[in-house]
Amino acid sequence: MSYPKTGQEVYVSLNLSNTMLTGIGKGTITREEVSVDYLKKLFAKYGVIVSAKPEQHRLLEIVNETFDLGLELPEELKLFQLSEQHRRLVVINVQGLRRKGGSLLPEYTEEEFQEATFTFVKYYVQSRHYDELVAENEKLKYDLEQELEWRHRTDS
């Protein structure tokens, strides 16, 4: 599968780190588990940039074989930061593999790879801070209540 180059590509990684978030400043991040069908549409619309170590190629190959995502296997780790331009990150969560200090190991046997299961979590960055969004929501709610009271008033 070939994905477009849009300038707003979705980052894909096997982990989430604080350095990925330092480019966004003050804002709100939403998190949601997503389906493979959703990812295919998202990638087809925005494109993809994969950030993975070369020793994680086999994991990406298994993801591609299992879910037909057509992810690129980068020759070297591409570091990135979420920003106004690149607002989306998909983390491929891998369960069922041994870890050291919470991190995936550089090598696994094929039998271990067969035990791996995958889920996908999308993180989306909004440039507006959560507190601003809550305040705006409260104001809209108040305005709506005032409008409804006006429309349903009874003159005595």
Image (cartoon, grey):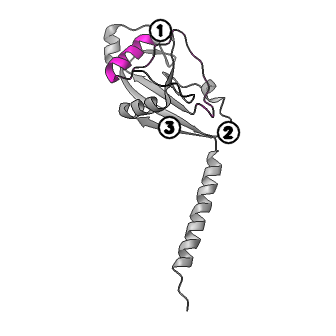
Q: Where does residue 51 sit, x and y in percent of width and height?
A: 52, 18
Residue range highlighted in magenta:
57-86
Residue 31: mark: 3
The amino acid on which the numbered mark 3 sits, given as a three-letter code, is Arg
Q: Residue 156 vs residue 128: left or right? A: left
Q: In this view, does 139 lie above or below 91?
A: below
Residue at horizontal 39 percent and vertical 28 percent from the top: 119
In reply to whether residue 8 is colored magenta, the answer given is: no
Specify the quadrant that holds the N terminus.
top left
Q: Are marks 1 and 3 in contact (CB under 8 Å)?
A: no
**Mark before the other along the chain sequence, 1 or 2:** 2
Which residue appears at 66% of the width and 29% of the height?
23
Amino acid type at circle 1 is Glu
Q: Mark 2 points at which residue?
A: 26
SS of the residue under disc 1: helix
Rendered residue at 51%/79% (across/down):
152
Q: Position of residue 97 (x, y in %)?
A: 39, 17
In the displayed structure, would residue 102 be above or below residue 35?
A: above
